[in-house]
Image (tube, rainbow, N blue to C red):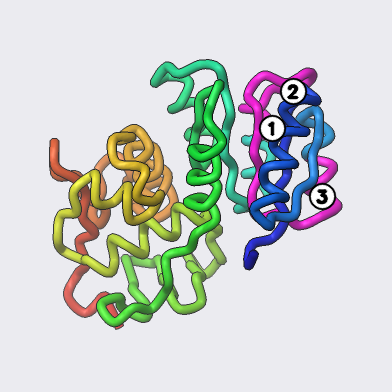
């Protein structure tokens, strides 16, 4: 596998054991932790490409753990939860999760979500500009780097992939389903709350007035588009 290790965080030993066995059989390197505190310690000591994080943990919750992870890292995070309400999903996404899967889940579904979380949208495709300037924000797609107000700006992997896909189709409204399947994978398409949360996060980082966006625009009931000023792309 080209991806780095996966960290499984769950307080139930049986779930950790099943996840480890299944993921290792697929060629992944796997470590595990039984609490949010243990997970944060693992992340300080080692590099991981993906964290599978249960929402109900002893000590600090999965949501708070995700929030603390996201404060210092862009590692992909999939929240696992017995709750399936939209509010729960939005809370997880707001905390910085990339995806949300409801227990009990089948391992084929989980493996598909793992593949989607680890996949990268190739940068600098033929239709994608090498760099874009949005006001005082400079985006270098080839280097996957953003500078705002002269300071580096950190985006998560999925935030950058979403921005990259919008830029490669600049000034055209992209339908919700197309965006979801392009960025999160073919098994997604109906989770519009994902787009709402991630677009809001991008706006807060890029737009001067996030509630009155100039660049990342909403087409109601249809999708989103990146509006590029003349001469903004190179």
Q: Is residue 36 left or right of residue 103?
A: right
Residue stretch in magenta: 40-65
Q: In terms of sequence position, does the residue under pointer 2 or pointer 3 come before the other?
A: 3
Point 58% across, 28% down: residue: 80
| Residue that carries the numbered disc 1 in the rendered image | 65
Point 64% across, 38% down: residue: 52
| Residue that carries the numbered disc 2 in the rendered image | 60
Query: Quadrant where the C terminus lies?
Result: bottom left
Q: In terms of sequence position, does the residue under pointer 3 or pointer 1 come before the other?
A: 3
What is the crowding at mark 2: few (fewer than 14 residues within 10 Å), some, or many (at least 20)?
Answer: few
Observer-nearest of 85 and 155: 85
Mark 3 lies on a secondary structure that is helix
Q: Is residue 190 left or right of residue 48?
A: left
Q: Quadrant of residue 188?
A: top left
In whole angstroms, how far apart are the C-alphas of marks 3 and 1?
13 Å
Q: In terms of sequence position, does the residue under pointer 1 or pointer 2 come before the other?
A: 2
Q: Where is residue 207 in the image (x, y as percent from the top left)?
A: 34, 53
Q: In this view, does 184 lie to the left or right of 226?
A: right
Q: Is residue 202 above or below residue 12?
A: below
Mark 1 lies on a secondary structure that is helix
| Residue that carries the numbered disc 3 in the rendered image | 44
Q: Position of residue 132 (x, y in %)?
A: 33, 73
Q: Where is residue 96 in the image (x, y as percent from the top left)?
A: 54, 39
Instruction: Assess whether mark 2 and mark 1 are in contact (beta carbons under 8 angstroms).
Output: yes
């Amino acid at each position: 596998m080209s991806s780095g290790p996966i960290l499984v965080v769950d307080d139930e030993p049986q779930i950790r054991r099943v996840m480890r066995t299944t993921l290792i059989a697929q060629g992944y390197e796997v470590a595990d932790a039984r609490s949010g505190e243990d997970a944060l310690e693992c992340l300080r000591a080692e590099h991981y490409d993906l964290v599978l994080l249960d929402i109900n943990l002893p000590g600090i919750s999965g949501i708070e753990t995700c929030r603390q992870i996201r404060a210092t890292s862009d590692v992909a995070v999939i929240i696992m939860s017995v709750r399936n309400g939209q509010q729960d999903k939005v809370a997880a996404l707001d905390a910085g999760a990339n995806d949300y899967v409801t227990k009990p889940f089948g391992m084929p579904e989980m493996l598909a979500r793992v593949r989607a979380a680890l996949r990268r949208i190739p940068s600098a495709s033929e239709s994608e500009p090498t760099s874009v300037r949005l006001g005082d924000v400079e985006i270098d797609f080839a280097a996957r780097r953003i500078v705002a107000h002269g300071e580096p700006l950190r985006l998560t992997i999925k935030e950058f992939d979403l921005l990259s896909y919008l830029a490669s189709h600049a000034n055209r409204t992209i339908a919700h389903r197309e965006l979801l399947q392009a960025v999160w994978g073919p098994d997604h398409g109906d989770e519009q709350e994902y787009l709402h949360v991630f677009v809001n996060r991008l706006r807060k980082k890029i737009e001067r007035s996030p509630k009155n966006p100039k660049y990342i625009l909403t087409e109601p009931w249809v999708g989103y588009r990146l509006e590029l000023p003349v001469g903004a792309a190179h």
